[in-house]
Amino acid sequence: MKKNNRLYYWLFLAPALISFLIVVVIPFAMGIYYSLTDWTAVAGLKSNWVGFANYKAMFSDFAFKYSFMRTFLFTAISVITINGMALLFAFLVTREIKFKNFFRAGFFIPNLIGGIVLGYIWQFIFKSVVPAAGAYLGIPALEELLILADPTLTLFGLIMAFTWQYAGYIMMIYVAALLNVPQELLEAADIDGANFFHKFKSITLPMIAQAFTITSFLTLVNAFKQYDIIIALSKGGPSDMYKGEIVNSSEMLAVHIYNVAFKYNNMAEGQARAIIFFLVLSVVSIGQVYYNKKREVEM
Amino acid sequence: MKRILSLMLVLMLVFGALSFTGCSSTTEEPAKTEEPAKTEEPAEEPAKDQEVVIYQNKVEIHEQLTEFAAKYTEETGVKVTVKTSGGDSPYAENLKAEFQSDRQPDIFVIEGMGGYNTWKSKLAPFEGQEWMGLTDLAFNVEGNTFGFPVAVEAWGMAYNADMLEKAGVDPASLTSQEAYKAAFEKIDSMKEELGIDSVVAMAAGPDMRWVTGLHNFNGYLSAGLPYGDTTVLDKLNNGEADVDRLTEYADWVELLFNYADKAVLLTGNYDSQVGQFGVQKAAFVHQGNWIDPWLMSNGVDFNMGFAPHASVYGEHNAIFIGAPSYYVLNNESENKDAVNDFLNFMATNELGHNYMVNEAKMVPAFKNVTLMPDAPLSSNVAEWLKVDNGAYTWLQNDMPDGFGMGTIAPLYEAFAKGDIDKAEFINQLQKKIEEIE
């Protein structure tokens, strides 16, 4: 009987295990192998072992370093704005107000729009609506403002679009967490004369620390991997001068890797960058989860 | 009994999962593949069992080509299947996937030397075919013909003939940088009268890097040189820059940028650039005859034509004419004869001509075609084709992968924004060329 149990155990696990093996483990191992060769993805061409040449080329590439830096900047600001907005929305829609379900749905809806569509919507806003509004209001500076020609404004434009898309989703997680904060604790604090900030700092924040772990993980990973909004909104542009080199100011890592692999047709080099991208993202997100876990409290 | 039943259930689940993963990779196929309307084949002759699969990259002619393939099947009984991917979905990448599948295409598309270098292990040359004598634009490497020119395309400075007439500028006089400068100044001073925002509709933003990094830069590679001359290109591919030529060329870029509308130049996309010309807010547009469908579908009816690009100093009487893509033969194809018959049919038969000119709205690369395109810029290209030495070579696809759109296009953007001046622009271009190994 016991032996049978073990058989069933593996049998039931098999579909999941096999799929995981086929679609994750094997391709990943192949990816690592390809990053050490001069693989071109052309059928019938043998790829040659080149050792760490692709990795060396990567670390001496200025565009890669710049892209890394911009990605970190974009991620850091996005994590803050998305979580800030989401928490604010969550507070608003958990209060006793009319139509709160309507508002919850409203904030969530941008998340249902695909990144490409959303990118084009914001591109339209930045290119056509803003100048038109400037003309209507009689502000020449706004009328002639080319947001997508300015590197800094474009970065903030991207963050705005991403926040608009993602804050509603993160808000839902905060709403669930806020509803789980025990009312009796808050009431007891009220009686003791605590004001809003005291309560927020000492009760609400520790009680929703678990949600923080999840939300900061989700926003971090998603911001780091951002691709579709960038492609639709700015295509990696506009150009910028950095240390005497001309660079693509919004070419984040995912876009950069795609360009190296498919525009420059350097499949293996793109693959090597993707491996580094994966490693950095894993380290950062595991570190973040570990750090946040420590702050969680159990009731 | 029960145990056996449950065991079977589990096994079914396992195989279900397996076949599901197997299926998911093939489900896309039927959507892409469009079978010709006629599928029944006469089975008597073994030769008719040959079937040609074309994997091509022009989404806009997919239906027309499929229809033509169906007509061909009707005439000859040989089945031709057209598969298409392109537009926004990257053809080169999908082609690699297509080669991993069990049915490789017999004909696929390359766009020049870059594609040739990637795919040369897969290509077979065409030998002694009828169509080869009818065109100068076939794709040749070391005396072997590898590519059947899909169509002719061309770009020059497209102008609004009615507007130039109103401004008193003769398009035939636009043959040098001085002439352009004078004409631009004159038109610029008449902006109000003509109702235009800027003289040229030019775009150098992130959406339009092919205009600057490929098309405009091709002026540096081939303007003023005899057709087929690749000396400047060869030097570039060896990492050598011709600084005198770059300096002359930078004057041309500066001239275009100075007389362009800032918003279109820096953030414009295809629609805003072509649109500026289409609604007569600009007298010139830096685009080719592929904008015809856009103009026609938007009801543009003024007269227009191409003037030469004065990319470098000297007199010019030619526009950039070339075949943007070629049909090539897969050397592992089992249907080589059928492929040759099909391509000859397209180049020599009335039905083929009708398909290329009237259905697909292309300018054919073959001299025996007498039909004239009805689209305004395409018919102008057909006229330029008859001019002696009226063509400069397309070399922009023969640069290293990514060099045009990836490496140098941002320099144009920086120059257009004023981040760098002309001297620095030349300097940077030179540096990027010298970085090529």
Image (cartoon, rainbow, N blue to C red):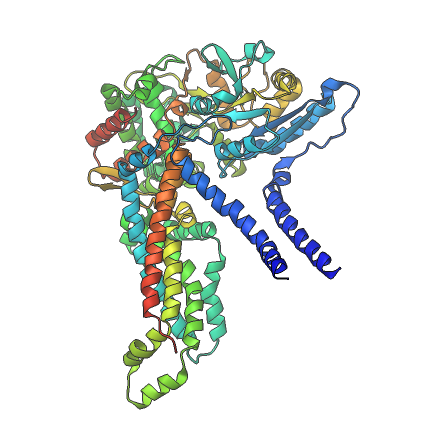
Indicate the quadrant where residue A62 lies. top left
Residue B298, percent from left and from top: 51, 39
Name which residue lies at 28% across and 25% down: B433
State whether residue A81 appears in this view.
Answer: no
Quadrant of the image occupied by residue A247: top left
Q: Nearer the viewer, residue B229 or A291?
A: A291
- Whether residue A92 is visible here, answered yes or no, is yes
Please state which of residues B222 and B304 is positioned toward the viewer in this rendering.
Answer: B222
Q: Could you tell whether B304 is left or right of A204 in the image? A: right
Report the quarter where the N terminus of chain B lies.
bottom right
Where does the C terminus of chain B fall, quadrant-wise? top left
Look at the picture and state if A180 lies above or below B303: below
Vertical placement of residue A138 versus A297, above or below = above
Residue at the (56%, 11%) spot, across then down: B127
What is the number of callouts on the image? Answer: 0
Looking at the image, residue A135 lies above or below residue B163? below
Side of B178 relative to B121 (left or right): left
Q: Position of residue B33 (x, y in %)?
A: 63, 35
Quadrant position of residue B39:
top right
Instruction: Point out residue A81 in the picture as x, y percentages from the top left corner.
Output: 33, 62
Residue B44 location (% of width, % of height): 80, 20
Can you name the residue that lies furthest to the bottom here? A191
